[in-house]
Amino acid sequence: MQAFAYSNPASVADAARAAAADGAKLIAGGQSLLGSMKLGLAAPEALVDLGAIADLKGITVAGGVVKIGAMTTHAAVAASADVQKAIPALADLAGKIGDRQVRNRGTLGGSLANNDPAACYPAAVLGLGATVHTNTRNIAADDFFKGLYETALAEGEVITAVSFPVPEKAGWQKFKQPASRFSIVGVFVSKGSQGVRVAVTGAGAGVFRATDLEARLASNWSAAALAGAQVSADGLNTDLHGSAEYRAALIPVLAGRAVG
């Protein structure tokens, strides 16, 4: 790796100022960024470490909302009794991300800012209709994810927390790549104040909603409602792990399993 400057700010305001500098990059758990740097795929001139900012960590449940700080690790979400009670599917998803090292270093905010097309957390955020909070604004899940590794975040904008509305029902199913444990296809379903939502990760260039499946489940929340459902393979990924047609076939199957 090339040389780079390093800072460890103690506040979100200081982090945002440091991140606004040319060539600077925010780092959370570092599970994606450090690997990219080692491979020469990323070469930031400065790293701004968010690890010392206490305000970015923690979980609260109040008023039908689970709010999770951006620097809260996957392991902490999975182990939280509050999350397990309020949104069991979210705790289940967090507990199946990567391996122990990834779960104990990786963070919610880092995963969302990176927006890997096969990451798990984007499916939960979109599938639950969550709100992403930053140091400057609140962004609805439907407006946050823009495409391959692309989000609505501006340069220097810092994710501070994510608010998940507690659903009436929710479920998560992932068909994983066995080595990386990323989703070949992952499907998060929910039914709540925002209606029925079905979010898919791993299948395309980024997380997306399967609106045809949502319509079926809105009429009948059951696996039987998805019997015979088909998803178009147009625009889906084809790689050594599976064709676009294979991924398309997996989506309604996993959605049915997630509904239970």
Image: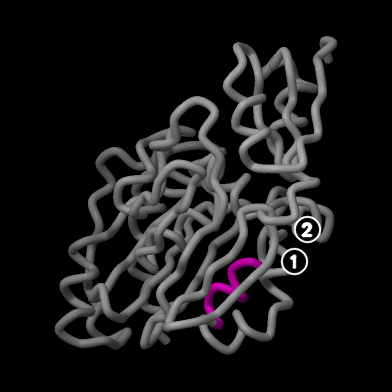
In which quadrant of the rendered view does residue 59 lie? bottom right
Looking at marks 2 and 1 on the same chain, the residue that comes earlier in the sequence is marked by: 1
Which residues are the magenta region? 88-95
In which quadrant of the rendered view does residue 183 lie? bottom right
Q: Nearer the viewer, residue 116 or 245?
A: 116
User: Which class describes the residues within 10 Å of circle 2: few (<14), some (14-19), or many (20+)?
Assistant: few
Q: Amino acid at mark 2?
A: Asp
Disc 1, SS: helix
Is 9 located above or below residue 160 in the figure?
Answer: above
How far across and down, in percent of the image, does residue 175 sit?
54, 62
Task: Say which residue label 1 marks.
Answer: 75
Can residue 177 be seen in this snapshot? Answer: no
Q: Residue at x 36, y 87 (%)?
A: 168
Q: Residue at x 74, y 48 (%)?
A: 53
Q: Kindly indicate whether the residue at mark 1 contacts the one at mark 2 (C-beta within 8 angstroms).
A: no
- Residue 79 shown in magenta: no
Task: Say which residue label 2 marks.
Answer: 99
Disc 2, SS: loop
Q: Is residue 84 left or right of residue 191?
A: right
Q: Residue at x 82, y 10 (%)?
A: 2
In which quadrant of the rendered view does residue 127 lie? bottom left
Tell me the quarter of the image containing the C terminus.
bottom left
Q: Is residue 42 left or right of residue 256?
A: right
Is 74 located above or below residue 63 in the figure?
Answer: above
